[in-house]
Image (spheres, rainbow, N blue to C red):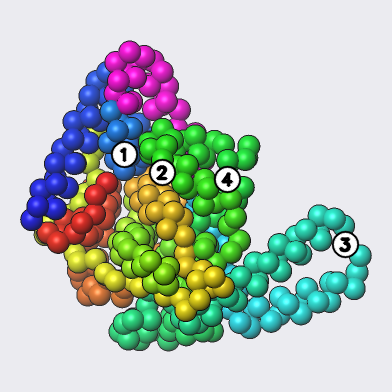
Amino acid sequence: MSTTISLAKTQTTRSTLIQAISTAAQISRVDSAIWAFLWTADIPNLEAMLDNAKSNPRVVYRQLVNCHQARDAIRKWMVRTQFPSNEQHRVHRLKEKNSRSSSMSMTKERSANLDSVLSWNAALCKTRDGNKCVITKANAYLHTNPSDTGNDSDVKVTHLAPISLEGGKCIKNAPFWNTLRLFFSDRKVNSWITATRVMTDTSNMICLSAGAAQALATARYALKPRSLNTNRTEMETEFFALPGGYHSSKRDIMAKPLFDAAGTKGEDVYVGVRLITQNPRVYELPSWEILELAWHMNRVAALSGIGNGNSPQTERRIVSVMRRIRGLSVPAAMQVERKCARRRMLAFSLGDVRQDSTMKF
């Protein structure tokens, strides 16, 4: 109960700060990308923005109106790499072997070397995760669909964060990190920059079924790191469903994300996604910092609605996968989705209102 009260107090503080920023900067509507960042930002960052808005309202107004960098940051985040299944991998290796007989430029050689490193680490990731989807392997009910069995042939090694962020704070990534610094603490952003210096090893990889990988690529869920043992052989994460939102260039800045789309206390989170490795030196677990970055950015991407233009077939597959992961019946799932669509709002995180939840923003 105390956690629920604490969460409610945090949201009240956030709402009060955003209202004050809106008044000081004289802005009432923003792009949904900015809106998403505001409603997930660290409280101290909002306090700093308010102080700045009181002394330099035009500066903050321009920051909130200029949505291009926020949109670009979300789009950059949404581009992830998935590695092929075993059969596709064998075909790829055969083509790669045949191509070695021909002369290659320096650029092609670098590309081939990168592919080789990625393929090697993808194999390590599959070994670490037991050739199974880390989310669906614990629940037999999730394997009832033959097209999404979670078996090795259907497993895809997926990057938790896009490898385009590799290199830390190099020039090409500066706009991304500058955007995040506006909404998140320097301590967090600096730790994320350090963690993303190398993005091609198993610290940025995870095994997912085809459907779960597709749902992650469209920010339909997020894994929040909860604990890591001292030997770094076991990590507990928590699964949060994030139904798709809708992008708007004129979102009411005070429109609160729906924590409870179905009008009840909220659906239970699928808790206890455990990541295990027998040898952390060879089969490194996903990076805590990268998972934390993914936790924040997936929520921002889901709220903003950017990248939610899936084809009807893809959308049906994602809805089916998320329904099975969340253990919902068809009527309940459709009820939540219809209400979200009608109000053009997002059921922000279906676990946030649980009394035993320890999640804070």
Q: Amino acid at mark 1?
A: Asp
Q: Amino acid at mark 2?
A: Lys
Residue at the extreme front: 230
Count residues near mark 1 (Cα–Cα under 10 Å), then give few for <14, some for 14-19, many for 20+. some
Up/down of 329 relative to 226, above or below = below
Q: CA distance from mark 4 to mark 3?
A: 29 Å
Q: Which mark is residue 201?
A: none
Q: Which mark is residue 104?
A: 3
Q: Amino acid at mark 3?
A: Met
* Of pointers 4 and 2, the one earlier in the residue sequence: 4
Q: Is residue 272 left or right of residue 199?
A: left
Q: Which mark is residue 168?
A: 4
Q: CA distance from mark 2 to mark 3?
A: 41 Å
Q: Which residues are magenta?
A: 48-74
Q: Nearer the viewer, mark 1 or mark 2?
A: 2
Q: Nearer the viewer, mark 2 or mark 3?
A: 2
The foreground one among 313 and 100 is 100
Q: Disc 4 on helix, strand or loop?
A: loop
Q: Amino acid at mark 4?
A: Gly
Q: Nearer the viewer, mark 4 or mark 3?
A: 4
The reply to whether callout 1 and callout 2 are in contact (CB within 8 Å) is yes
Determine the residue positioned at 32% across, 26% down.
Answer: 48
The foreground one among 241 and 336 is 241
Q: Is residue 46 left or right of residue 280?
A: left
Determine the residue positioned at 62% across, 47% down.
Answer: 167
Residue at the extreme top: 55
Q: Disc 1 on helix, strand or loop?
A: loop
Q: Which residue is mark 2?
A: 188
Q: Which residue is mark 1?
A: 42
Residue 194 is situated, as x and y percent measured from the top left of the image, at: 53, 48
